[in-house]
Amino acid sequence: MNLTPLDEAALEAEYNLIVETLKKTKFNKSRTAEILQIDRKTLYNKLEAYAQFLASKTVKQEPISITP
């Protein structure tokens, strides 16, 4: 996932809004989608997109071998 810094900031802001709304609804996804005025499937897609974004940001290292 290749995003500009502005795209990354927008994605993070959107994710933070979703998480805050999820907390307020006690993690009721249907109610969260309703409050945010998006389809529940769109909510799932946005959460998945953010998870993929975070996974792409994770530094992946080779395992360290401890055998001589």
Image: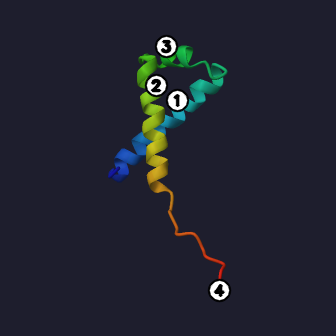
Asked if one can make out residue 14 in the rendered structure from this viewpoint, the answer is no
- Please, what secondary structure does the residue beneath circle 2 have? helix
- Residue at coordinates 53% horizontally, 36% vertically from top-left? 16
- Mark 4 vs mark 3, CA separation in Å: 58 Å
Among the two numbered marks 4 and 2 on one chain, the one whose residue lies closer to the N terminus: 2
Residue at screen point 50% across, 62% down: 59
User: Which residue is label 2 attached to?
Assistant: 43
Circle on res. 18:
1
User: Are the residues flagged by discs 2 and 1 in contact, CB closer than 8 Å?
Assistant: yes
Where residue 1 appears, x then y in whole percent? 35, 49
Q: Is residue 52 above or below residue 17?
A: below
Kind of residue sitting beneath label 4: Pro
- Spatial CA span between label 3 and label 2: 10 Å
The earlier-in-sequence mark between 4 and 3 is 3
* Mark 2 or mark 1: whose residue is earlier in sequence: 1
Element carrying mark 1: helix
Residue picked out by circle 3: 34
Amino acid type of the residue tagged 2 in the rendering: Leu
Element type at mark 4:
loop
* Residue at (49, 18) in percent of width and height: 33
Measure how far apart labels 2 and 1 are at the Cα level.
8 Å
Question: Disc 1 vs disc 4: Cβ atoms closer than 8 Å?
Answer: no
For residue 67, side relative to residue 5 (left or right) = right
Q: Residues within 10 Å of mark 4 (few under 14, many from 20)?
A: few
Say which label, 3 or 1, has the lower sequence index. 1
Given this view, does label 4 or label 2 mark the residue nearer the observer?
Answer: 4
- Is 36 in front, or is 63? 63
Q: Position of residue 2 (x, y in %)?
A: 32, 52
Label 1 CA crowd tier, 10 Å (few <14, some 14–19, many 20+): many
The mark found on residue 68 in the picture is 4
Q: Pointers 4 and 3 in contact (CB under 8 A)? A: no
Q: Amino acid at mark 1?
A: Ile
